[in-house]
Image: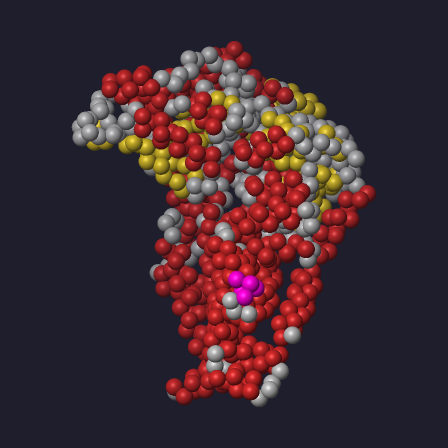
């Protein structure tokens, strides 16, 4: 009767809507069509790949830059420097001159030749914007760049800077784009590239901003070619959505650090339907104490906090053991970080004794300790969208309450968080070391500079009486010439930082990988930010 | 009628002008310094000279009123400046992201109309019967469901478990089903109740009884008399909702990886991309105005009393 008509009209309209909505159907078909005859590997990332320019930073992603652009030398297992675009090199003048012998069989993906001239052009383009890259000390050390002959390139430094080769392995900014990619002005930093053309195993085939990027295998690649034909990177911002897309089969792999919740990882692992892997520790999740604050400038307080925090509870309850407990600022498996120090054990009695010694006494009828009538309150700053930081912060708050310390939790969205962190408006801050290949030397170097490319550590540690000495030592170690010297000096620096208790290491972060059972070759690469796209293969 | 439309359009101009002032000033209220923010996100050392040079380049050394005039002049030429992050014109980014959101919102919006009108009218005609009770239950539960939870539930069941629809992303027609449903369900609950209420009100009017007495067909009564009269309050609400939905797709876009305005806006806020935030807010505001304007005109067309009353005031 009457209602039947309304329903009928509604149905017709609904059909029309769906038909109208189909205007962009082609895209999906295109992806689907390529799947039939090719090996297409799909994974997701939380943001867009950016404009694929190796000479710039955000919004570029490390992994995508590394897929398209290559370095002179490669950071191998255990930090071993391997030949890459340079097949060999000579170090002259006690480490002040580097002569690179380039491979002669490398071509950019547009067919143009890779030679010493283009290496120099890329170096010079980066050096033209020196200030933007000064978080890498090598940039400041470079005096001249020279073309010796077609395949020989020479780098002259101001000082014998030992991490030179290591810093040349970085994903940015010292990697190479083709002549045709340079903008008319030649300034790749300000004006960007005309096209993302590199020498790497992958070529960008298609990019739809904030939706997906498709990379195809580079036919003219000089090295071992990728095993799959195409890699599709889908942009999925939400971690839970990522898990559902993976379960549905729309993704072949989930990879990275913090890309899904610990609960989801545990769930996927226990389902038994997928393969899972956890990498060796890459970086350290740590709390940083602001020694400029009066309370925190007291070493006894810092020590008390070290002893009062029950790390094991956090490892068990938040990380389910996925991240391992950290007792030192850097994971012990990195070069120069294997330092023997006594870890600060969980010991509430010791913590209370230290607070008493520092003059912070318990007051009858009050929950928190006081000194000269002031309650002991510390502000802990964390990133509001980071659920792990939030959960840990609550544990810290609970643990410190037990020894009479009031912890005020302050959350800020990430940009404001870093501004506040650099300005030093906090007592305790969440931070993390930079992982391979930046740890330990680049991270420690950042402590000595207030550059915005550095970290909040410079200001946080500046309340220490021996800060100047620490800075000098770090600068010295970077210019050491013998391995023995270097080991000794790193040992001293790291012991110093440990004994002063300015960092409270919580856990060692790892990359995780969850992938379908038909995927092979998922091995973690030495650089934390790289994704093993070239070794991955798919069984049918 | 044309006169009525003309007057409404004219009336919108001061509102949009006011909106532009508010948008401009809002940015001034945000803590932090745009120059320093720009330098930080660009990874450029903030030396005194650089900051000063950039202040002049961005026109921030001018008095506020001049800054506004300059900004407005640019905006009128569709020049919203350059994004701090992508370094591309803001307009390009907005067009790229606005379209997917507009598509999604339009589909959801039509879904609301198509579902809530028949449900509302039918339950009013069958007041107190089981169908009415069922829709009432649906209305209450749909309004109470949090969007993100509903989104994940739909994803889990329709996509992962039963493998009927794609989980997320944008592409074909079927990609619209889950996000549009998630976006629409809460509104459907609200509007079916609203339509039910206004239909019942109309049903009790003497002219319906008269129409029945005249022996008109039920169909004619429902379509020509009840719906037309009951539509007016619903339309006003829907107009507001359309604007709300455009701005409120943020959660849905995030969950379903939909490359729209919501994602752009959130990203811009997180990165303090001032020109982008400004442009997004202004655009959403204008769309809000325009939909309301459209609703006003539609209401005037549906109900002559409104446009006549408007004329009489003058």
From which residue to which does the magenta span run? Answer: B129-133
Expressed as whole percent of the image width and height from the top left, the position of residue A369 reads 24, 27
Expressed as whole percent of the image width and height from the top left, the position of residue A465 reads 31, 22
B155 within the magenta span: no
In-image side of A373 versus A352 (left or right): left
Query: Of residues A203 and A7, which is closer to you in this image?
Result: A7
- Give the residue drawn at x 44%, y 24%: A313
Quadrant where the C terminus of chain A is found in the figure: top right
Quadrant of the rendered image containing residue A243: top right
- Give the residue drawn at x 62%, y 42%: A244
Q: Residue furthest top?
A: A484
Does residue B45 sit above or below A401 in this rendering? below
Query: Of residues A202 and B196, which is closer to you in this image?
Result: B196
Does residue B11 sit above or below B101 in this rendering? below
Quadrant where the N terminus of chain A is found in the figure: bottom right
Magenta stretch secondary structure, dominant: helix
In-image side of B54 versus B101 (left or right): left
Quadrant of the rendered image containing residue B226: bottom right
Query: Of residues A402 and B190, which is closer to you in this image?
Result: B190
Expressed as whole percent of the image width and height from the top left, the position of residue A368 reads 25, 29
In-image side of B271 versus A352 (left or right): right
In-image side of A23 versus B97 (left or right): right
- Give the residue drawn at x 47%, y 34%: A388
């Amino acid at each position: 009767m009457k209602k039947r008509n309304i329903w009928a009209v509604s149905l017709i309209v609904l059909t029309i809507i769906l038909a109208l909505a189909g205007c962009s159907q082609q895209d999906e078909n295109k992806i689907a069509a390529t799947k039939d005859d090719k090996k297409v590997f799909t994974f997701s990332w939380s943001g867009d790949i950016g404009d694929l320019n190796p000479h710039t930073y955000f919004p570029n992603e490390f992994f995508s830059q590394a897929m398209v652009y290559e370095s002179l030398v490669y950071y191998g297992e255990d930090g071993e420097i391997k030949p890459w675009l340079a097949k060999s090199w000579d170090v002259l003048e006690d480490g002040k001159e580097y002569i690179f012998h380039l491979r002669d069989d490398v071509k950019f993906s547009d067919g143009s030749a890779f030679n010493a001239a283009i290496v120099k052009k890329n170096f010079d383009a980066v050096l033209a914007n020196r200030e933007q890259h000064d978080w890498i000390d090598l940039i400041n050390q470079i005096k001249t760049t020279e073309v010796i002959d077609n395949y020989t390139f020479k780098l002259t430094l101001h000082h014998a800077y030992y991490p030179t080769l290591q810093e040349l392995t970085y994903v940015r900014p010292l990697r190479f784009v083709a002549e045709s990619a340079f903008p008319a002005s030649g300034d790749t930093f300000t004006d960007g590239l005309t096209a993302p053309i590199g020498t790497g195993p992958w070529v960008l085939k298609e990019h739809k901003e904030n939706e997906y990027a498709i990379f195809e295998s580079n036919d003219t690649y000089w090295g071992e070619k990728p095993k799959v034909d195409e890699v599709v990177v889908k942009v999925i911002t939400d971690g839970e959505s990522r898990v559902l897309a993976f379960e549905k089969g729309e993704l072949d792999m989930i990879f990275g650090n913090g890309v899904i919740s610990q609960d989801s990882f545990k769930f996927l692992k226990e389902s038994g339907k997928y393969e899972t892997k956890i990498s060796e520790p890459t970086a350290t999740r740590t709390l940083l104490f602001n020694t400029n604050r009066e309370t925190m400038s007291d070493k006894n307080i810092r020590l008390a906090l070290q002893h009062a925090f029950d790390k094991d509870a956090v490892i068990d309850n938040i990380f389910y053991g996925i991240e391992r407990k950290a007792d030192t600022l850097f994971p012990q498996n990195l070069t120069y970080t294997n330092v023997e120090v006594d870890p600060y054990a969980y010991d509430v009695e010791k913590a209370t004794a230290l607070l008493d010694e520092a003059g912070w006494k318990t007051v009858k009828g009050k929950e928190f300790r006081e000194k000269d009538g002031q309650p002991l309150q510390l502000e802990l700053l964390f990133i509001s969208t980071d659920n792990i930081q939030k959960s840990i912060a609550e544990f810290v708050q609970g643990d410190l309450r037990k020894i009479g310390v009031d912890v005020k939790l302050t959350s800020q969205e990430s940009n404001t968080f870093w501004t506040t962190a650099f300005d030093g408006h906090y007592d305790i801050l969440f931070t993390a070391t930079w992982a391979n290949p930046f740890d330990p030397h680049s991270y420690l170097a950042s402590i000595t500079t207030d550059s915005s490319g550095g970290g909040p550590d410079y200001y946080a540690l500046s309340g220490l009486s021996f800060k100047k000495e620490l800075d000098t030592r770090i600068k010295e170690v970077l210019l050491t010439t013998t391995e023995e010297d270097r080991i000794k000096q790193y040992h001293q620096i790291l012991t110093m930082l440990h004994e002063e208790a300015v960092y409270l290491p919580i856990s060692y972060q790892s990359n995780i990988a969850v992938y379908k059972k038909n995927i092979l070759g998922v091995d973690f690469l030495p650089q934390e930010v790289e994704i093993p796209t070239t070794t991955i293969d798919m069984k049918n | 009628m044309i006169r009525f439309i003309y007057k409404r359009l004219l009336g919108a101009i001061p509102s949009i002008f006011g909106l532009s002032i508010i948008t401009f000033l809002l940015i001034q209220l945000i803590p932090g310094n745009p120059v320093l923010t720009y330098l930080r996100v660009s990874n450029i050392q903030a030396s005194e000279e650089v900051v000063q040079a950039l202040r002049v380049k961005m026109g921030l050394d001018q008095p506020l009123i001049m800054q506004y005039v300059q900004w407005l002049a640019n905006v009128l030429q569709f020049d919203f400046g350059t994004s701090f992050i992508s370094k591309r014109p803001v307009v390009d980014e907005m067009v790229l992201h606005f379209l997917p959101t507009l598509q999604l919102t339009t589909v959801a919006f039509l879904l609301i109309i198509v579902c809530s009108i028949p449900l509302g009218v039918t339950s009013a005609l069958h007041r107190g019967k089981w169908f009415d009770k069922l829709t009432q239950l649906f209305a209450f539960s749909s309004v109470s469901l949090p969007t993100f939870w509903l989104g994940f539930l739909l994803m889990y069941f329709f996509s992962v478990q039963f493998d009927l629809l794609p989980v997320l992303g944008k592409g074909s027609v079927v990609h619209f089903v889950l996000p549009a449903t998630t976006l629409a369900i809460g509104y459907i609950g609200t509007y079916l109740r609203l339509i039910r209420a206004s239909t019942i009100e109309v049903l009790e009017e003497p002219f319906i009884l008269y129409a029945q007495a005249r022996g008109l067909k039920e169909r004619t009564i429902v379509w020509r008399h009840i719906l037309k009269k009951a539509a007016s309050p619903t339309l006003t609400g829907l107009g507001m909702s359309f604007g709300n939905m455009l701005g409120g797709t943020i959660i849905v876009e995030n969950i379903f990886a939909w490359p729209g305005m919501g994602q752009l806006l959130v990203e811009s806020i997180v990165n303090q991309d001032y020109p982008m935030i400004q442009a997004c807010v202004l655009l959403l505001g204008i769309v809000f105005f325009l939909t309301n304007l459209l609703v006003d005109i539609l209401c005037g067309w549906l109900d002559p009393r409104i446009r006549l009353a408007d004329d009489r005031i003058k």
